[in-house]
Image (cartoon, rainbow, N blue to C red):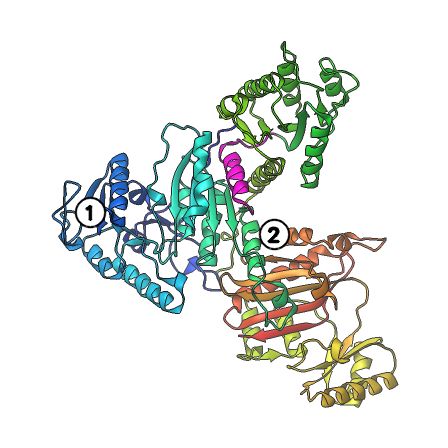
Amino acid sequence: MLGSTHGSLSTDPRSARAVACGERPGPAVHGAADLDVSGRPLYAPVPDLDRFFRPETVAVIGASDAEGKPNTGITRQLMAWSDRVGARLLPVNPGRETVFGLACHASAAELPQPVDLAVLLVSDPLPVIEELADAKAKFAVAFASGFAETGAAGTAAQRRLAEAVSRSGLRLLGPNTNLNAFERFRDDLEGPAIALITQSGHQGRPVFALQELGIRLSHWAPTGNEADLEAADFISYFAERPEVGAIAAYVEGLKDGRSFMLAADRAARNKVPIVAIKVGRTETGARTAASHTGKLTGSDAVTDAAFKQFGVIRVDGLDELQDTAHLLARAKPPSAEGVVVYSISGGTGAHFSDLASAAGLSLPVLSEDKQAELHQWIPEYLSVANPVDNGGHPVGDWRGRRIIDAILADPSVGVLVCPITGPFPPMSDKLAQDLVDAAEHTDKLVCVVWGSPVGTEEAYRSTLLGSSKVATFRTFGNCVTAIKAYLQHHRFVADYRSPFTDAPRTLSPSVRKARPLLRKGQRLSEHAAKQLLRAYGIRVPREQLVNSAAGAVRAAGLVGYPIVMKASGAQLSHKTELGLVRIGLTSASQVRDAYRELTDIARFWNIDLDGVLVCQMVEQGVEMVVGVHHDPLFGPTVTVGLGGVLVEVLRDTAVRVPPFGPQEAHAMLRELRGYPLLEGARGQPPADADALVDVILRVQRMAMELDDSLAELDINPLMVLPRGQGAVALDALAVCR
């Protein structure tokens, strides 16, 4: 079962820029058409990192063989690594004639030949970059610290370094990186490998150590401060390597949201799973936002949304990272999603089944025929419906293997899990061997949880870890997490279509109507914000803006009773709290009184009004919120959630980053805890979810086309009417950039 292959994308001939940077372009023809309507790229070239990981020549700037010097140990490690990859090492140090017996050069300018990789063991890499450019170096690694991680001065220094690298034509890893890329990788392991990306080298150690358990590692990219090369570059490269079965990443901060999305898109199209830890889950963004959307869309929520859109599997612990990545790297696609639990203890089976069910895994009840078959070898008083309780795995004959084979033969079963909470020889030894033997003869996933805290048992160290067909875990939780991710990944890639394929490249006619409504740095009144919605075909109630009580009465007659009256002004964001809304008005006298009350309140609070809105009253439906917020990393984002006056209390929202299509918009709705309200809860008619999706997509188009002008948009409430009747934006707030 374990052992997987992934497809690859064809690429067009290289553009001049891609050749200059040593990059393979994406599958699009370069040009203006490769930008969406927000001006963001729709393709990303793949850096040609072959000569970084397998160089023919390596220059070590600052090489040393002096005892007690830090550079000496690094030079020695780089010499050993160069020998392993078949590279010629060229020491550079103006103060030495030789280093470890190799002729030493005074500067990079004096190198006798172009170098593929230059390793900079100097405190200030900036002066060396220009020399390396003249020497035609392809890649450089800067270990030096004291850059963006130290504050404003370091950030400025890193900016100067990045600018020099951009001018030079070479590609830089770092600064503030380490030697992880030059570790000794085991070459005796087979099967698909894990490629590792970390911004903190130490955090990758548990994944790297998987080699000691027989899991192959192919690459380690310690990206450091990412002045040039970033995680997205390595994701794009690894996603096209035939030996890479999964990408594991520890990310502290993304350099650019769109470049990450394009890289993750490439991995999704190639069916290469990405498992990532992204630190910083606490909400830090949008503290001063005017709209509900801004308050609800923190930076981590946006990152999480981007991960979901492109199938990136987010985990929290390093143990989860290693276990999930190793399963996804090696397991073939499932033939079914059913999970069967097989155990020697009813309590163990029940415990694992509870955890699996709570995680959303499907544990099908085995058919009566299958249960009768299993009861040939398992006593009748034990339950074999799922979980399967064998009461004690047979030791002395063939029955144990027959039980496992029978379970795996069931067409509803795609995953068999055997939790072994502790060694109980000889039973546990025979059970482990039978599981390994069965796994050799099936395409279905066989997982074992070896719960012994010791981990030195022969059944674990030799039998289970010695098999490339069985996925072995140490905890129930990690096993459940990995299986869930495995099934989700294959479900995701089976239906995946790149959103960049259909992203809008030309502006819609709505832009010409919308732009005159926007005022730089200002907040729009409700009336103006609704005009913005109309420009994009979003339905609003019948309404008129009036400036007198008599005008309000005339407008009410035209709109039709009952009506709603609201104060309208650019300063107003939450009118209900100030008492500036009147609903259910049914007569001219009520309208006149309401007009006077609203204008009196506005004068009391010194609020400038552009008038009073007399609006059609829309009552039946589900109140939702749809909004736009600008994220500094990803750009415009779109949020949908339960709306109304309790929106910030309920905080039931889903976020996506454009571009996305109708399928993703529907997925947003299904994420909401309040989704049953749209389906028709407690006898209410189902709401028009298709109309809600249409509004989401129109708002997305607006967010992309007006990204340079629109900072925030909040439609709350958007009343979603019963199925077939559409959706109406009852209120709106817009803030210009």
In front: 483, or 698? 483
Residue 40 coordinates in the image, percent (x, y): 45, 61
**Picture quadrant of residue 350:** top right
Disc assigned to residue 344 = none
What residue span does the magenta drawing correspond to? 316-335
Element on which disc 1 rests: loop
Q: Residues within 10 Å of mark 2 (few under 14, many from 20)?
A: some
Amino acid identity at mark 2: Glu
Q: Quadrant of residue 394?
A: top right
- Residue 239 seen in the figure: no
Picture coordinates of residue 674, whole percent (x, y): 74, 55
Q: Which residue is mark 1?
A: 66
Residue 120, placed above or below residue 298:
above
User: Magenta stretch containing residue 318, yes or no?
Assistant: yes
Identify the element where label 2 is drawn.
Answer: helix
Let me know if residue 288 appears in the view. Answer: yes
Q: Magenta: predominant secondary structure element?
A: helix
Instruction: Give 482 or 489, whichever is nearer the viewer.
Output: 482
Q: Confirm whether the magenta stretch covers residue 9.
A: no
Q: Who comes first in sequence, dot 2 or dot 1?
A: 1
Mark 1 packing: few (<14 Cα in 10 Å), some, or many (20+)? few
Place of residue 452 in the rendered image (x, y in percent of width and height, measured from the top left): 59, 29
Gap between marks 2 and 1 measured at Cα: 60 Å
Q: Which residue lies under the disc numbered 2?
A: 664
Q: Are marks 2 and 1 in contact (CB under 8 Å)?
A: no
